[in-house]
Amino acid sequence: MKDLLVAHRLFKSYNQSGNSVQAVKDVSFKIQKGQCLGVVGESGSGKSTLGRLLLALEQPDSGEVWLKDKEIFQLKERELREARRDFQVVFQNPTASLNQRLPVWRSVMEPLNNFPEVCPPFLSDVRHSPRDTAAKLLEMVGLKAAHMDRCPHQLSGGQRQRVAIARGISLLPELLVCDEPTSSLDVSVQAQILDLLKRLQTELGMSYLFISHDIAAVGMMSDRILVMKEGQIVDEFMSNQIMSKDRHEYTRQLVAVVS
Ligand SMILES: Nc1ncnc2c1ncn2[C@@H]1O[C@H](COP(=O)(O)OP(=O)(O)OP(=O)(O)O)[C@@H](O)[C@H]1O
Ligand SMILES: [Mg+2]
């Protein structure tokens, strides 16, 4: 299978009141086209930092990320803006990532408004009309046309995350980074959102970087799993090997907590 993304020897440190904290230490991996790569680890292990690096929201201290044939940290601002259509994100907290004052259909349309020339196949018959386009995207994530004129506070947490997902898929990105997409939600809706993400990934052929501290969720979503601890990858395996005796001690601890 073809590699969509190659991360090579990424290092990222932060200055915290005079001390240097190594958030990501020498991390390398690949994501194949159409694959979901899971990243699991305890709080502070560097998962979100890694996600932000892949999205070029931060610069590494050193290391490279190749998306298709481009090294993203070498891109000029204009090239990076162009490349952004290929990588989108769904964050943990949809309330923070949606504009509270905009009706949700306008939030859904933001990425497409930034890329007027982009028209994914599933939008081909509605792209001429912004409202019809938003309605179609909302329908794809299980919302109704009646939701489109509401503001985020008039929706449930699960519905708000569906709006964020609609926006995340709107450009048909090659890579969708999902950073704890269900951690802010009621347990009862977490499974529905995971099912939705999985279905969209398969139907649309996107690759995911799926970040969670919940190894059960990561196991359900991912083809391959990286386990992070203190900024490093301590274990790496295909998800069907999650119970194998070869697993790192730390992976076993994560599994033991949920089983
Ligand atoms: N902007 C920042 N400034 C300073 N330190 C940071 C910054 N972002 C992250 N860190 C530090 O980097 C380390 C890794 O943080 P990160 O947010 O990547 O962890 P995480 O695995 O996503 O944790 P969580 O599961 O709680 O989301 C932590 O020690 C954190 O305090
Ligand atoms: Mg995080």
Image (spheres, helix red, strand yellow):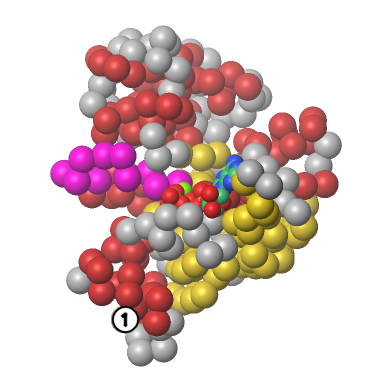
Q: Residue furthest bottom?
A: 245
In the rendered view, would you say 62 is above or below 145? below
Q: Residue 182 lies in magenta, yes or no? A: yes
| Front residue (pair 74, 12) | 12
Identify the residue shown where x is 26% and y is 74%: 256
In the rendered view, would you say 37 is above or below 150? below
> In the rendered structure, which segment of residues is drawn in magenta?
179-190
Q: Residue 109 lies in magenta, yes or no? A: no
In the rendered view, would you say 161 is above or below 107? below
Identify the residue shown where x is 72% and y is 32%: 81
Q: Residue furthest front?
A: 18
Figure label count: 1
| Front residue (pair 225, 59) | 59
Identify the residue shown where x is 19% and y is 46%: 187
Residue type marked 1: Met
Identify the residue shown where x is 43% and y is 23%: 98
Quarter of the C terminus within the rendering: bottom left
Q: Secondary structure at mark 1?
A: loop
Q: Give residue 149's position: percent from left, percent from top.
A: 33, 10
Determine which residue is flagged by label 1. 243
Residue 93 in view in this figure = yes
| Front residue (pair 258, 130) | 258
Residue 67 in view in this figure = no
In the rendered view, would you say 226 is above or below 70? below
